[in-house]
Amino acid sequence: MKNERLYKVILSPHISEKATVVGEKHNQVVFKVVPDATKPEIKNAVEMLFDVKVDSVRVVNSKPKKRSHGRISGKTKAWRKAYVSLKEGFDIDFLGVEGA
């Protein structure tokens, strides 16, 4: 049961300009995670799925934003992201492309 939970903790990698800068500068990777995920769960899930060693995990809750289209207004979903610092010598390559 515990391993099943770890497979569901990480939803996807979050790729943005800020995530790329953080990744290059601090050897961190950013993931979208389930809203009730804890730091130890995120750490164990990343170590198990990607076969790396995690140094630390920081979690940010992103608030929903108001959006409107004409007279119709609403909100985006609230979501949670995790900044995962990898130990020295470890790296996660999502593209799978090696430099030529």
Image: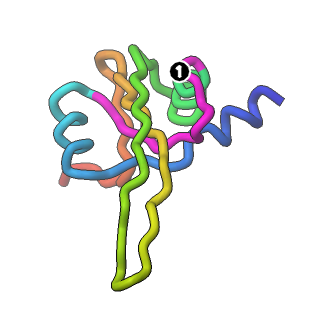
Which quadrant is the C terminus positioned in?
bottom left
2 with respect to 52 (left or right): right
Q: Residue at x 42, y 73 (%)?
A: 73
Q: How many residues crowd mark 1 within 10 Å: few (<14), some (14–19), many (20+)?
A: some
Q: Nearer the viewer, residue 97 or 59?
A: 59
Find the residue positioned furthest to the bottom: 70
Q: Residue 19, how many percent across, how many down? A: 26, 42
Q: Residue at x 47, y 40 (%)?
A: 80
Q: Residue 44, how many percent across, how many down? A: 59, 22
- Which residue is under mark 1? 39
- Image quarter for residue 21? top left
Find the residue positioned furthest to the right: 1
Q: Residue 81, how many percent across, how many down? A: 43, 39
Report the amino acid beneath label 1. Answer: Lys
- Is residue 99 shown above or below 61? below
SS for dot 1: helix
Q: How is the image coloured?
A: rainbow
- Is residue 77 shown above or below 62? below
User: What's drawn in magenta, residue-wise?
Assistant: 28-40
